[in-house]
Image (cartoon, grey):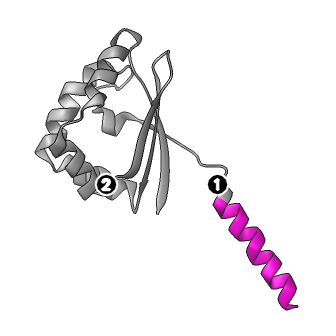
Amino acid sequence: MQRVCFQLQVKPDRIDEYKRRHADVWPDMLAALHETGWHNYSLFLRPDGLLIGYVETPSLEAAQAGMAATEVNTRWQAEMADLFEDLDGRAPDEGFLVLEEIFHLEDQLAAHQATADTDVQK
């Protein structure tokens, strides 16, 4: 499973509206996200509008393509686009900046456990 963290910038004067729209996302949008591989999906918003998203998915590319093929996503992205800065004409789900993962606790614990297991076998 791929872990993806991304960022966007919500316009400061549109933060309340952004929160309101996400308080009750359309049921067909929720279903489409789930069906196209968006799992454990969360959004975090700083008071200045910095938005951080996190999703686990077998493939970000496939998850994005799956959503792009849905009518509900087309409607959702059109309604949300004017809430963001610096999209350069892209939809929010295409204009986010993916952040590089540099640490994951479980991965490092597993690597250390594998090393310890190998040392015991010697």
Q: Is residue 93 above or below residue 47?
A: below
Residue plotted at (17% across, 51% down): 69
Q: Quadrant of residue 92?
A: top left
Q: Is residue 99 above or below residue 19?
A: below
Disc 1 marks which residue? 104
Location of residue 106 in the rendering, given as x and y in whole percent from the top left corner: 65, 61
Q: For the residue carrying disc 2, how many other residues have a C-alpha within 10 Å: few (<14), some (14-19), or many (20+)?
A: many
Which residue sits at x=80%, y=84%? 118
Check the image and report above or below for 74 versus 36: above
| 66 within the magenta span | no
Q: Amino acid at mark 2?
A: Ala
User: Is 110 within the magenta?
Assistant: yes
Q: CA distance from mark 1 to mark 2?
A: 22 Å
Residue denoted by label 2: 63
Nearest to N terminus: mark 1 or mark 2: 2
Q: Amino acid at mark 1?
A: His
Q: Is residue 23 left or right of residue 46?
A: left
Q: How would you classify the magenta stretch by its main secondary structure?
A: helix
Write the start and end of the magenta stretch as one range. 106-122
